[in-house]
């Protein structure tokens, strides 16, 4: 099986500020683009992560793309299921290629062990109480071996496997796995997506240290709310938090 519509229209650029910016500009200029269209760049000068963070990627060594989806069937309240679907698809792709366990660090960073191999940035536009279109930005470290940014724990497919990868050969497999989960979302298989997401959630059910609203606490991830908030079991009981209220604490070797 191959993807039905994802990646059938790929627009290549040598260098852009960010693929999300380019796709957003195209949509704002009413450029007609089919669902599943992909913006791909060899290099991003201002690749973005969550909350304005910088995504480091050496030119030509990684997958830096943005996918256009049109989840008009999805309400605003359930938009986090889109993040779940994309995250699961990337995990399935990486587990198949690398033959290793891959986890999702809430809300949508992709981890192998305690190292980050991919990040996702989803930007939605709305019409009424439904999503109109979604720009799915994906940065996946493929062949990069040296990281110069202050990111604490980056890794790549090559660092993990010792192999050099052909990016053009990887893309169809990545698109297929993402589209499978997107179609599950479209078919309203929400309980399935949540179950799969929790099964891959980094530190799920484990005691670990977090900085919660500025305080360092030992907590246990117990659930995800439909809104996307993380539910932690603390000494005070179950509490839910958004991304600006909690920070993961990593051991320093």
Image: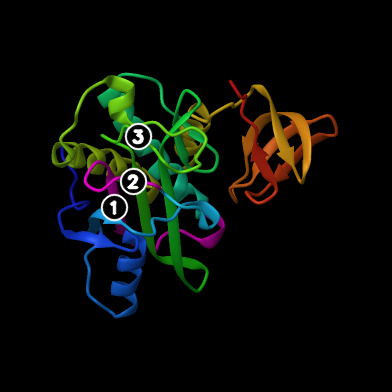
CB atoms of marks 2 and 3 within 8 Å? no
User: Circle 2 is placed at which residue position?
Assistant: 57
| Residue displayed at 73% across by 29% down | 219
How far separated are the C-alphas under marks 3 and 1?
21 Å
Q: Nearer the viewer, mark 3 or mark 1?
A: 3
Dot 1, how many residues are within 10 Å of its Cα: few (below 14), some (14-19), or many (20+)? many
Quarter containing the N terminus: top left
Tell me: residue 151, above or below residue 205.
below
Instruction: Report which residue position mark 1 lands on.
Output: 65
Q: N-terminal of the two: label 3 or label 1? A: 1
The residues bearing labels 2 and 3 have C-alpha atoms spaced at a distance of 10 Å
Which stretch did the figure color magenta? 56-78
Q: Is residue 17 left or right of residue 175?
A: right
x and y percent of residue 230 in the render?
Answer: 64, 41
x and y percent of residue 98 in the render? 29, 23
Q: Between residues 61 and 226, which one lies in front from this camera angle?
A: 61
Task: Locate the C terminus by quadrant.
Answer: top right
């Amino acid at each position: 099986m191959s993807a039905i519509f994802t990646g059938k229209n790929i627009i290549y650029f040598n260098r852009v500020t960010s693929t999300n910016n380019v796709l957003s500009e195209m949509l704002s200029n009413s450029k007609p683009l089919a669902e599943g269209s992909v913006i791909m760049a060899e290099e991003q000068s201002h690749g973005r992560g969550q909350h304005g963070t910088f995504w480091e990627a050496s030119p030509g060594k990684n997958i830096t793309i943005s996918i256009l989806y049109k989840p008009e069937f999805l309400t605003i309240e359930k938009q986090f299921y889109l993040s779940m679907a994309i995250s699961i698809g990337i995990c399935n792709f990486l587990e198949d290629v690398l033959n290793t366990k891959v986890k999702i660090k809430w809300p949508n960073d992709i981890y192998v062990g305690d190292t980050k191999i991919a990040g996702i940035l989803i930007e939605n536009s709305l019409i009424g109480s439904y999503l109109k279109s979604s720009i799915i930005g994906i940065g996946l470290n493929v062949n990069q071996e040296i990281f110069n940014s202050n990111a604490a724990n980056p890794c790549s497919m090559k660092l993990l496997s010792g192999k050099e990868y052909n990016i053009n050969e990887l893309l169809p497999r990545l698109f297929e796995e993402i589209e499978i989960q997107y179609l599950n979302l479209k078919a309203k298989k929400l309980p399935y997506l949540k179950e799969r997401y929790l099964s891959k959630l980094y530190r799920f059910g484990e005691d670990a240290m977090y900085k919660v609203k500025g305080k360092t606490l030992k907590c246990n991830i117990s659930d995800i709310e439909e809104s996307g908030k993380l539910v932690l079991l603390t000494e005070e009981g179950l509490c839910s938090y958004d991304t600006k209220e909690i920070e993961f604490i990593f051991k320093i070797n």
